[in-house]
Image: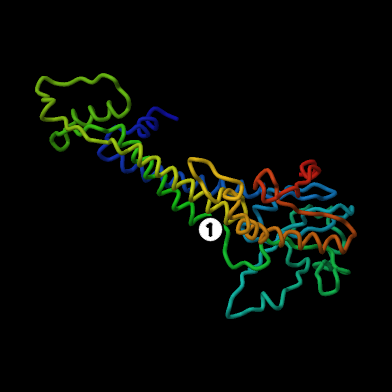
Amino acid sequence: MTNEQLGDRLGQDLSRDLSQKVVQHRDDFYQFFVGRYVEGLATLFSYSCDKPFNKMTLEIALRMGYGVAYGKNKFGNPCILGYIQYNNGFNYQTPDTLFKPRRFTGADINYIVPDEVLPERAKTHQFVEIWDNDGANTGDFVVFWNKRIQLVNDYQVISHYASELAEIVASRYSLIMQSKIMTVFAGNVGDETINQLISDLYNGNPFVKLGKQFDVEDNIIKVDNTNLSNNLAQLKTEYQNEIAELNASFGINVLAVDKESGVTDAEANGNLGYVTMNGNIWLESRQLALDRYNKRYGTDFKVTIDGNAVGKLAGDTTNESNNDNL
């Protein structure tokens, strides 16, 4: 960071810069919160497979709305073959997506594996999806989807809560700056002496130079900021509530009740049914693809919710061997 950039961050003309700081702080938070939350969601599930694959790639692709084709390569090893661009969103006016599911072929796949490891059936466009209509007795690959039917886009949910959280963070940041500026300085518009004085005090300078003409009683007005600590505490509580709502909507266990005196197990898990219901939305879709693959090839691949990520929601379903494969 250059000296010029550092000066801009500290702010030399506070009458102009402080409001920009709050807006920039809010926008920066929104951007990194959405990215960080999506990164966290990518670790939510554990896959038990004979051959490892990059679950981060799989999960982020699914959250973005892509289908991910999973099958065997030329050497008989299961792997991610590629991705499918297809809108599986349900439209109430045209319910074909719900009642007439499509069987995908190799022509729908954007392959990510090299040509030299593709099976000959894929090269000759004979690849077809494994599906339930024939008891998963035919086909070459399965397709993972984030949800069986897309009614709500995950990114829209994250963006909604990120916007609310960003406003809370902006308010908190504004209050923190207000706590540093407990004094109002009266001066003429464009008075560089006053502007420099304010900048020095805001940036932590313990000493400032004043001219003999500066009248402390006339030019300095004290501001009562005694309620700032209470306001900050309330914002912290609201921030935690928003995070809890967001986590619960994605199947991550959170406290149903939060009290200073502590909570009982019953209170802490009072919303476990709601959290479990949400978690199953994504879990069911992923396991459905593996169930079809298992029937076709006689394997026993599973996907589970990572107990370390969601607490009691996963119970004893975590599989230690999963961590070795991923």
- Give x and y (percent) for residue 20: 33, 43
Residue 214 vs 221, above or below: the answer is: above
Tell me which corner region of the image, top left, top right, bottom left or bottom right, holds residue 183. top left
Residue that lies at the very extreme toward the bottom in this rendered image: 93
Q: Residue at x 78, y 69 (%)?
A: 105
For numbered disc 1, what is the local secondary structure?
A: helix
Q: How many numbered marks, from 0 up?
A: 1
Which residue is at the front of the view, 242 or 302?
A: 242
304 to 220, vertically: above or below = below
The reply, left or right, for residue 188 in relation to residue 1 is left
In the image, residue 131 lies at what x, y percent? 80, 69
Q: Quadrant of the N terminus?
A: top left
Image quarter for residue 148? bottom right
Q: Position of residue 136 (x, y in %)?
A: 85, 68
Q: Compared with residue 90, is residue 282 higher up or lower down, i.e. above or below?
A: above
Q: Quadrant of the C terminus?
A: top right
Q: Amino acid at mark 1?
A: Val
For label 1, the residue is 157
227 or 180: nearer the eye? Answer: 227
Callout 1 crowding tier (Cα within 10 Å): few <14, some 14–19, many ≥20: few
Q: Is residue 235 left or right of residue 112?
A: left
